[in-house]
Image (cartoon, rainbow, N blue to C red):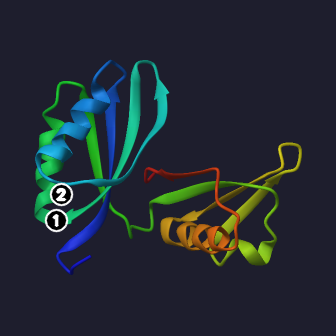
Amino acid sequence: MSALTRRWFAFVRVEDRSGASAALTGVFSERGVSFGSLSTLAVHAGVGTLCVEFAASERLAQVLVRTLARLAVVRDVDLVRADDARVRAVAVLPGAVAPAEAGEGVAAWADAEADLMVLSGSVSAVESTVDRLRAAGRPPVAVSVLPPR
């Protein structure tokens, strides 16, 4: 990424109806921006939150947010830089992770019955731990980014 291009997360609250995801992805596609990930977070009472990870200049990111906000299905958009300390990530991995494997700044919880481990921490800390475990042949089952509180 260049100095002008940053990694962003857009947390978009949308109405839970047909075509909502397509409308969002169309905004990015029309502006030539691909996204690193797109995930559905909580959906409740007819409203869901989508997390879109992408790379763009600050100016383009602001254009995307304004365009998203004008969509009929969108309730609101929160744009956050990926390095913002308020943004947290969680990862779920099969098997147990030794505390030393979790990495600095990453909390780990075990579910022995399901043979799963949940990691939580800053985006960079969780991604670093997941990258290290993936290289060791232990890929995650899921990784999700949570909106800032």
Residue 148 position within the rendered picture, expressed as x and y whole percent measured from the top left = 43, 54
Image position of 33 with respect to 43: above or below:
below
In the foreground, 138 or 84: 138
Name the element at disc 2. helix
Which numbered dot is residue 61? 2
Query: Label 1: which residue?
Result: 58
Residue at (49% x, 71% y) in the render: 124
Are the residues at dot 2 and dot 1 in contact (C-beta closer than 8 Å)?
Answer: yes
Residue 91 image point, x, y percent:
62, 56
- Furthest toward the front, the residue is 137
| Closer-to-camera residue (41/97) | 97
Q: CA distance from mark 2 to mark 1?
A: 5 Å
**Residue 87 - label:** none
Crowd class of label 1 (few under 14; some 14 to 19; many from 20; radius 10 Å): some
- How many other residues sit within 10 Å of disc 2, few (<14), some (14-19) or many (≥20)? many
Give the residue drawn at x 21%, y 79%.
2
Looking at numbered disc 1 in the image, what kind of residue is underneath it? Answer: Glu
Asked which quadrant contains residue 56, the reply is bottom left
Q: Quadrant of the N terminus?
A: bottom left
- Toward the right, the furthest residue is 113
**For the image shown, how many numbered marks are present on the structure?**
2
Callout 1: SS: helix
**Image-based side of 64 in relation to 87, left or right:** left
The amino acid sitting under disc 2 is: Ala
x, y percentage for residue 31?
Answer: 11, 50
Q: Is residue 63 left or right of residue 149?
A: left
- The quarter of the displayed image where residue 83 is located: bottom left
